[in-house]
Image (cartoon, rainbow, N blue to C red):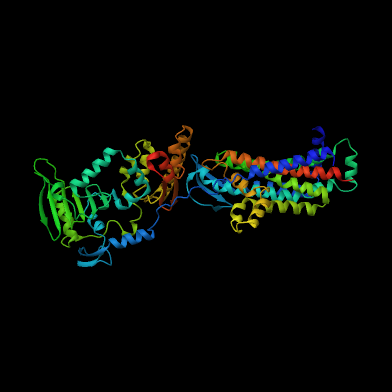
Amino acid sequence: MKKKNVIWIALAVLMFAAATWLMSSGRKAPENTGKQISFPRRLKPDEYRRMKARQRQLMLRMVAGRSDEMQEGSQSAVYDPMLVALSVSEQRDTMLIFETAELAGSPVVRMLINCMPEESVQDLNRLKEETGIDPFENLERAAVTGDMMLLEGDFEAARWENIFDEYKSENYGDSGVIHRPPGGGDGGKATETYAVWNNEMLIRAQDEESSRKVIDLLEGREEYGGSVFEPEDTYGQIYGRIAVEDALNFFPDTDDDMAARFSQAVDSIGFHLDATEDVALVADMSGQQPEMTRDVASSLGGALSLARMKARAEGQEDLAEFLDFARIDPDEGSFSMELALPIEYIRERLGECAGE
Amino acid sequence: MKRISFAAFDLLKEAVARKWIVAVSVLITLMLLTLAFFLRLDVVDGALAASRFFGRDMGSDIRAVDIELKPLFQAAGGLLFYSCLILGAFITADFAPGLLSPGRIEHTLSLPVKRWELLTGMFSGVLILVLLGCMYAAGGFTVILGIKTGYWTSAPVVTGLLAVAAFCAVYGPMLAVAVFFRSSAVSGAAGGLIISLGIMASYRAEMAGMFQPGTGRWIFEILTAPFPRIVKLSTFAMNLDYAVSTDWLELVRLIAGHILFGSAALIVGILGFDKKDF
């Protein structure tokens, strides 16, 4: 065999060997699809079971004519006590409901707890010892409206005497206790009243009358005008609705023209936040004028896109990544907005304390 | 170098005369014109507000144009990559057998050009031809979507370049086989076989698990190891612009591996060509 041929053969073998080595690293190629986020759109099976478990037999006094199914007079049926209690609130344009027990178990909250400073952990333990309530164990759900706050959970071990030691307490109705503030209502002093119902619901209301009203309603002495929030809409870990003006307060940098158009076009904002894995938010907005709503949806989509581009250009990668998942889904007279924070992103931002 | 360029240029002249090349050029042009005239994209402040194709609503989500168009770019990237390999193998299968055919090769060899230069020139000519086709399709796609949306990305062009790197690994063996058999059918079949083996090699780790540990698995792993990782490279090509963190080292290794594989096969062809008595 000629020497030249040997060189060619050796070169070919060497190149095949090098190619084999280069292509056999065993490292994976990038994922074919991007990160998929599961947005809260309807009750998941667990949430349906949760909804059903909360409904129980209550004897309520119905107001006539609210719906075909409701008849005047006392009527026993299954209701979610907290949703019933919320109907007493008069400022419920903004109404937030927190599934505190589920939130406590969610990855993002667990990471935040891991990252809590030692002082805060000690404060939490002190609170638990003094009140007998462990926020992570005993609290099931919390609701906030403009004039009322409700906490639901297992308060059998609560030390009410410690919590309301300066309050005047009196039993009310079958299972209620009213805690009046000292000197409440006199000379501009605090009128906020607390009430506990059945050792499962703590009610903070603007005045004593509202507290009594909640207990009366739950025990069938006050007329019930119907649910202010449908049980089928109780999906996610934080949900409810926000008044348009309250929503705009979250975005103080919004220009006046956009804010004015938004206020005109949107009447109500319902939202659901899911934190079972990633943090995913869906806000449903609707208005009376379809064309104006569509116009606002387009502008909002553009604003989100511009904000993302600006963040990218200014090197604000955190904000840009957050806005990567922003999406507007327009419909006739309404639109929904999706925003998400992937759990990996939160873990990365929190650093080592978040754990694996 | 000059003589290699001459051989490459000769092949390109030959290619232009082929009807297949004209047909593919027309097909790419028609696809680009369809996109240009029938795809309507409504962009508001960098967000894609509405998209219509042939007047039909293609989804009404409003979101950043690059994110909304990501699936389109990925699909186009995949189409470009595999079209380049499959159509490329199909169209170029008869180039080398034609140039090496009796009567013609004797004339070519009478020119002042060495045999290895001739084969290297043919190899380079085919790659230039495929590169031009890919750049025409990818560049046209980028320009049309860029004008319509204001979003400019080099991703399709880079995908085209990666497709050419993959085709290098396919055409090297095709050319070597053409030297030995001088048959466009056999050359095309070799291309098809390399693409198939390349797909298999991309999944060799998963497939090896189907074999019992021992000699059978070992033989399978040895046999599939040298072949190009076509699917892996195509995955890079389709996600290049979008992956959160591209493994650049792995990508460079893959590109180099494909080019080396094709070049090694070319050397085998050159060895065979040297021994042929025309």
Query: In front here: B25 or A124?
Result: A124
Query: Residue A260, how many percent across, how many down?
Result: 36, 40
Q: Residue at x 53, y 43 (%)?
A: B243
Query: In front here: A345 or A25?
Result: A25
* Left or right placement of residue A219 versus residue B133 in this view: left
Examine the rendering and report whether any part of residue B204 can be seen: yes
Query: In front here: B97 or B154?
Result: B97
Image quarter where the C terminus of chain A lies is top left
Query: Residue B71, how many percent across, how many down?
Result: 55, 48
Q: Which residue lies most toward the front here?
A: B214
Examine the rendering and report whether any part of residue B37 can be seen: no
* Left or right placement of residue A104 versus residue A186 in this view: right
Query: Residue B244, how many percent across, how many down?
Result: 51, 42
Image quarter where the N terminus of chain A lies is top right
Count of picture labels: 0
Query: In front here: B175 or A63?
Result: B175
Q: Residue at x 78, y 46 (%)?
A: B175
Query: Residue A47, how many percent across, how many down?
Result: 35, 58
- In this rendering, the answer to whether A221 lies above or below B234 is below
* Left or right placement of residue A353 versus residue B257 in this view: left
